[in-house]
Image (tube, helix red, strand yellow):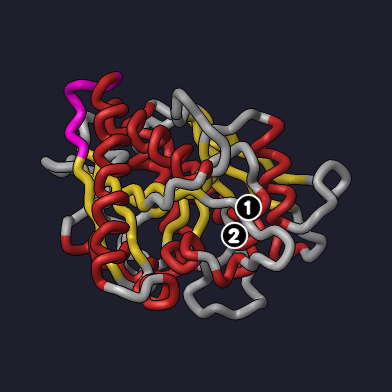
Amino acid sequence: MLDIKTPQDHIILVPMDFSDSSINAVYYAVEMANFFDSEITLLHVLSKSTLSGLFSSESEIVILRDKVRKKLEDFKSEILKKWPNLKVNTLLSEGKPFKVINKVAMDNKCDTIVMGTNGANGIEQFTGSTTSRVIKSSTIPVIAVKQKRTEPKFSKIVLPIDLTKTSKQKIDWAVKVGLKYNSTIHIIMELEKDELIERKIKANLKQAEGIFEKYGINYESHLLDDREYPDHLGKDTIKYAEEIDADLIIIMTKSETGKLSALFVGSYAEQIVNSSQKTPVMCINPKPTGSRATGGSGFY
């Protein structure tokens, strides 16, 4: 049985470094918070290594802190001009960014993190980015946003399903999102040449359909044919999402075992987050098999 009780408080954490992608994430999160009557916390993290490397005196660091605080407050004021009833918090902290973000999320009982990401370009690698490190270590869902979306909605959600046990945890979250938004869940699986694997895939598909029917959630099921979707699963998921103009892709960040034999592993999450230009990606770390994905979410 899914835990679909609504928490009394919703806090969406938005780490921002004032880049275009992080600003896009701010306004995306603001729209979400406004929809759910939630509050939002804008967080900027000053890296201690950067501070020690660029500034020679404490007075210079104090000036920088004041400038950052003012910039955060300016963003807050801008938000409140359009959404005067929204509760907006600002927070400046110092340390290793991904560790601070996760600690702030835990200490403040945040239920969702919304982050901007530019993906991997040139020498930038997903494994080294702050967003990727938060995604891989967070105990709550992380939504990675690239492009500006002025009216976030979740009418069409793409839910790839594989053979791993932890993949079924995505169904829990899809139920919670679907119930809140009256979404249509697009379940996708890839056809396999191996008949045994294909039978197992179709059995998982049947199970997912049964859960959505139980909760009265709209869904569509699609088995992706190699003739139309010839690439690897990551690219095919993005292609399908863009074709239907999806509002969200829900993925697990890795398989429980981390074995490359699983269809969805770390590289799959990297492909999706790096390559999905239009569609925000909700990333969920798997819990041990047998656990339910009952952690809080800004969606339910």
Q: Observer-nearest residue: 51 or 123?
A: 51
Q: Is residue 40 visible?
A: yes
- In the picture, the disc for residue 219 is none
Q: Earlier in the sequence, mark 2 or mark 1?
A: 2
Look at label 1 and name its amino acid: Lys
- Residue 150 in the image: above or below residue 236: above
Secondary structure beneath label 1: helix
Crowd around label 1: few <14 · some 14–19 · many ≥20 (10 Å): some
Give the Cα distance between marks 2 and 1: 10 Å
Which residue corresponds to mark 2?
Answer: 162
Residue 83 x %, y %: 26, 22
Mark 2 or 1: in front is: 2
Residue displayed at 42% across by 34% down: 28
Q: Position of residue 189 (x, y in %)?
A: 65, 50
Pick the residue in front: 1 or 258. 258
- The correct choice, above or below, for 150 with respect to 202 in the image is above
Magenta span covers which residues? Answer: 82-88
- Residue 89, quarter of picture: top left
**Residue lying at the far right of the rendered structure:** 227
Q: Residue at x 32, y 43 (%)?
A: 71
Q: Which mark is residue 202?
A: 1
